[in-house]
Amino acid sequence: MDRCYQNATKALPADQPLSGEVDIGLAVMPTGAVHNVRVARNTTGSNDLGACVQAIAASWSFPPHGESDPVEFIHVFRFGPRQ
């Protein structure tokens, strides 16, 4: 996620930090594959950051689980300048 943040801040002036949250929703299939990866909320104001985080999450895989239906969840990623 650091790469996403660094790339998104390149276009901004140094005195305009990028901060906020990107919420990624996804479904984990019984096989562990992810589906329906989406930006559920983005308070950063950067569509590029949201799209990058979404693309990374779409490449994830999880161990298979015993449920017959997909398990859906939302994960919140918080971004801001390092102190």
Image (cartoon, helix red, strand yellow):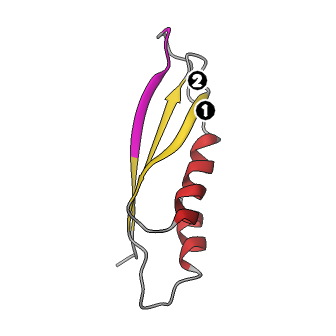
> Label 1 sits on what residue type?
Ser
Which is the main secondary structure of the residues drawn in magenta? strand
The percent position of residue 18, horizontal first and vertical second, equals 43, 75
Q: Residue drawn at (40%, 39%), measured in percent from left and top? A: 74
**In the depicted structure, whether residue 28 falls above or below residue 42:** above
40 or 13, which is in the foreground? 40
Residue range highlighted in magenta = 68-75
Relative placement, left or right, of 50 versus 77 is right
The percent position of residue 54, horizontal first and vertical second, equals 56, 49
- Residue that label 1 marks: 61
Residue 11: within the magenta?
A: no
Name the mark on residue 32: 2
C-beta proximity under 8 Å, tags 2 and 1:
yes
Q: Secondary structure at mark 1?
A: loop
41 or 16, which is in the foreground? 41
Tag count in the figure?
2
> Label 2 sits on what residue type?
Gly
Name the mark on residue 42: none
Q: Secondary structure at mark 2?
A: loop
**In the depicted structure, whether residue 57 falls above or below residue 52:** above
The mark that comes first in sequence, 2 or 1, is: 2
The percent position of residue 21, horizontal first and vertical second, equals 38, 59
CA distance for labels 2 and 1: 6 Å
The percent position of residue 39, horizontal first and vertical second, equals 49, 48
